[in-house]
Image (spheres, rainbow, N blue to C red):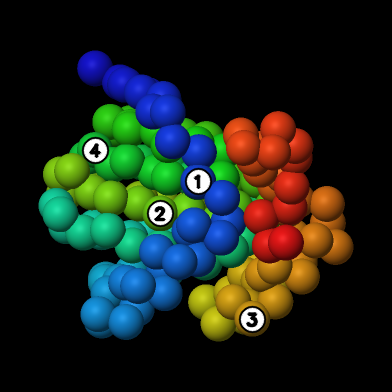
Amino acid sequence: MKTLVPLDNIPSYKEIKELEKAMLAVGGGGEDLPVIHRFADKIYSRELFMPKGLCLVGKMHGKTHFFVLLKGEITAWTDCGMRRMKAPQIFKTEVGTKRVIAAHEDSIIITFHGTEKVTPDEVEAEIIIPAEYEQRFLEENGLLELEYDKDKETLQLPFD
């Protein structure tokens, strides 16, 4: 049975970056995970195996692409909200997305990207926003979320 359960928390970009910083400080990040790269006519796919219990923060995407949860169950936490998903699921990842994923079961995720590049490094250079440019990319593309300050009853940029 497929499930897509919306959860209440909608983190800001700042909160996701703080979590990423904390995870990197203790050696987390998922850099050693097995990845399978595949190429077809102007299509690149990236398959990632996430063992149960792993939590990682992904890179920011500069282009839309498809995200497929092929196997398992995860919670994906993005600036659009938190969703608990059980395979199979497919959805479109929007420009500027940076997500946190926690695997509740051994899981397989595949992303599909349109590109004319022919190596994983070339594709990453084309579709990923380098960490040091993420905030500027969001600002320049009007993607930096506004946060509601309940005490002041106003909307504020999260980096004020």
In the image, which is nearer the foreground, mark 1 or mark 2? 1
> Could you tell me which secondary element the residue under label 2 belongs to?
strand
In terms of depth relative to the viewer, which is nearer, 107 or 84? 84
Are the two marked residues, 4 and 3, in contact with CB atoms closer than 8 angstroms? Answer: no
Left or right placement of residue 36 versus residue 81 in this view: left
Determine the residue positioned at 15% across, 54% down.
53
Question: Residue 44: where, in percent of width, then height?
Answer: 55, 61
Query: Nearer the viewer's eye, disc 4 or disc 3?
Result: 3
Three-letter code for the amino acid on which mark 3 is drawn: Glu
Q: Which residue is mark 2?
A: 100
Q: Report the quarter where the C terminus lies.
A: bottom right
Q: Amino acid at mark 1?
A: Pro
Query: Which callout, 4 or 3, points at the residue further toward the start of the chain?
Result: 4
Q: Residue at x 32, y 72 (%)?
A: 23
| Disc 1 and disc 2 in contact, CB within 8 angstroms | yes
Query: Disc 2, disc 4: CB below 8 Å?
Result: no
Measured from the top left, where is residue 95 in percent x and y? 69, 52
**Image mark for residue 73:** 4
Q: Relative to 143, does residue 30 appear above or below in the rendering?
A: below
Label at residue 57: none
| Location of mark 3 (residue) | 132
Mark toward the start of the polypeptide (1 vs 2): 1
